[in-house]
Amino acid sequence: MEECIFCKIVRDELPSYKVYENETVLAFMDIHPIRPGHLLVVPKVHEPNFEKLPIEVYMHVMQATHILAGAIKNALKPKKMGLVIAGWDVPHTHVHLIPTEDHEDITSKILLEGKEGNPSSETLTTIAEKIAAKIKDSL
């Protein structure tokens, strides 16, 4: 997708603060970080939905994320590392790797505002059953 900002970064058509790169993955600083050290880890192939990535590409992204989390932890000494795959802002699979000092650094705004959360046991059971049925379909 030629208009994707992350594809342009991968192709070096836009500048970025690169931290890591191999043949499959690129990691660079988020220019609107939640906390200092917030990285984005992206596959070089364009795919908006991480679950549709070829499994080999997904595994490369996760391996890079694991390595980078250790590097951030050693460099910046945060209390914990957080990982989020959302993709709402840029429709290209990307992992947010965030050094955190508090759970609110990556907690959903909806949850913090009290609009969601604490579902009933029945709701959790129903959703778990729906997901479990689809797992069987995909194996």
Image: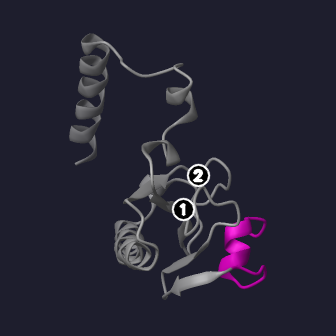
Principal SS element in the magenta part? loop
Amino acid carrying mark 1 in the image: His
Identify the magenta region.
2-16
| Disc number placed over residue 87 in the picture, else none | 2
The answer to the question of whether label 1 and label 2 lie on touching residues, with beta carbons closer than 8 A, is: yes
- 15 is within the stretch colored magenta: yes
Figure label count: 2
- 4 is within the stretch colored magenta: yes
Relative side of 128 to 28, left or right: left
Quadrant position of residue 137: top left
Residue that mark 1 sits on? 94
Amino acid carrying mark 2 in the image: Gly
Residue 28 in view (yes/no): yes
Q: Residue 25, image x and y in percent?
A: 50, 78
Above-or-below relation of 35 to 132: below
Q: Residue 67, image x and y in percent?
A: 36, 78
| Residue at x 44%, y 79% (from the top left corner) | 75
State which tag comes first along the sequence, 1 or 2: 2
Q: Residue 132, image x and y in percent?
A: 23, 33
Q: Residue 35, image x and y in percent?
A: 57, 59
9 or 31: nearer the viewer: 31
| Residue at x 70%, y 79% (from the top left corner) | 16
Secondary structure category for the residue under label 2: loop
| Residue at x 73%, y 65% (from the top left corner) | 4
| Residue at x 25%, y 40% (from the top left corner) | 135
Display colour scheme: one colour
Cα distance between the residues tagged 1 and 2: 6 Å
Q: Crowding at label 1, few (<14), some or many (≥20) Cα neighbours within 10 Å?
A: many
91 or 120: nearer the viewer: 120
